[in-house]
Image: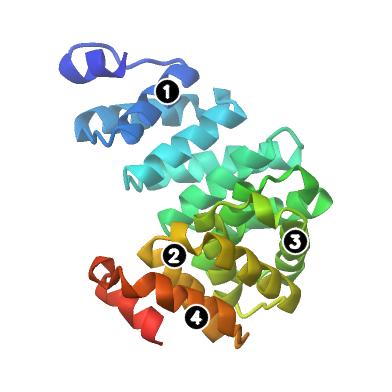
């Protein structure tokens, strides 16, 4: 559907929320950024966003972030309607985590939305999967929002499911806690043990972020740092200047 619209400028832009969200998601998923199409879909979304379901809102936000499309009126409208759904308890954990990740990726912040996200999460973090926890704490760290009750709750929840974290998710999680200077020694120690077991799967940025996080948090863990050093030596050519600086630091 989205391809037909892209190829034929005379085709009417869809009005159905699910169609709009699906077309935007398709463009983002295969990295096709047709400005004319996205502008048209964004404009239509503004007039129909009140009809969007939770998944439509989350999908549209994710698409904007992935396409690096910071359409301020649309983001503000998504935020307003997402807050309403979060406050009413009708938005699932994954949708919430995807929205806050998307806004953080675009460096766009709505303090009221973050308050709602924090409040809802503190009610029941058990419904958050490891990726949801990682995305949420990364978003708060990226936006420089130090919500200690939420962070401590995420640390406690993460401890219960660390083996289920993807390598990137674990790296982002320890980076986030270190960035916000909220350190759980128990979480960091358990994360180090898990990271050692998966160090071969870590990408250069994840290796450098993990090493940086433990150094910044002043949590010495020689076995982890040794494992990161060994894993990095054979891949130094893959490291960016920033990754190398973080690793050396």
Q: Nearer the viewer, residue 13 or 99?
A: 99
Q: Find the residue positioned furthest to the right.
A: 123
State the colouring used for the structure image.
Answer: rainbow
Residue at image x 49%, y 56%? 168
- Residue under pointer 3: 159
Q: Secondary structure at mark 2?
A: helix
Query: In the rendering, which numbered label is found on residue 226?
Result: 4
User: At which x and y percent is residue 105?
Assistant: 43, 55
User: At which x and y percent is residue 44?
Assistant: 38, 25
Q: CA distance from mark 2 to mark 1?
A: 31 Å
Q: CA distance from mark 3 to mark 2?
A: 20 Å
Query: In the rendering, which numbered label is found on residue 206?
Result: 2
Residue at image x 51%, y 80%? 225
Q: In terms of sequence position, does the residue under pointer 2 or pointer 1 come before the other?
A: 1
Examine the image and state in which quarter residue 138 appears: bottom right
Q: Nearer the viewer, residue 24 or 244?
A: 244
**Circle nearer the viewer, 4 or 2:** 4
Q: CA distance from mark 3 to mark 1?
A: 35 Å
Q: In terms of sequence position, does the residue under pointer 4 or pointer 2 come before the other?
A: 2
37 relative to 134 in the view: left or right: left
Q: Secondary structure at mark 4?
A: helix
Examine the image and state in which quarter residue 197 appears: bottom right
- Residue under pointer 1: 22
Query: Can you say whether 50 is above or below 19 in the image?
Result: below
Residue at image x 70%, y 66%? 151
**Circle nearer the viewer, 1 or 4:** 4
């Amino acid at each position: 559907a989205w391809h037909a619209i892209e190829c034929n400028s005379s085709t009417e832009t869809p009005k159905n929320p699910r169609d709009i969200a699906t077309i935007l998601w398709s463009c983002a998923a295969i990295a096709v950024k047709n400005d004319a199409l996205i502008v048209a879909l964004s404009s239509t979304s503004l007039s129909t966003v009140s009809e969007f379901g939770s998944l439509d809102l989350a999908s549209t936000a994710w698409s904007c972030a992935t396409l690096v499309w910071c359409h301020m009126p649309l983001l503000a409208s998504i935020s307003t309607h997402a807050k309403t759904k979060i406050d009413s308890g009708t938005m699932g954990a994954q949708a919430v985590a995807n929205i806050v990740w998307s806004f953080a990726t675009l460096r766009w912040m709505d303090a009221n939305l973050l308050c709602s996200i924090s409040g809802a999460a503190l009610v029941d973090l058990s419904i958050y999967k490891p990726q949801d926890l990682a995305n949420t704490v990364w978003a708060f760290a990226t936006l420089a929002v130090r919500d200690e009750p939420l962070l401590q709750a995420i640390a406690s929840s993460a401890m219960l499911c660390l083996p289920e974290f993807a390598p990137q998710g674990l790296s982002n999680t320890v980076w986030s806690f270190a960035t916000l200077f909220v350190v759980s020694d128990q979480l960091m120690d358990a994360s180090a043990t898990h990271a050692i077991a998966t160090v071969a799967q870590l990408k250069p940025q994840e290796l450098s972020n993990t090493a940086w996080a433990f150094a910044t948090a002043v949590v010495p863990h020689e076995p982890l740092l040794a494992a990161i050093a060994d894993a990095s030596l054979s891949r130094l050519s893959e490291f960016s200047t920033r990754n190398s600086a973080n690793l050396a630091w």
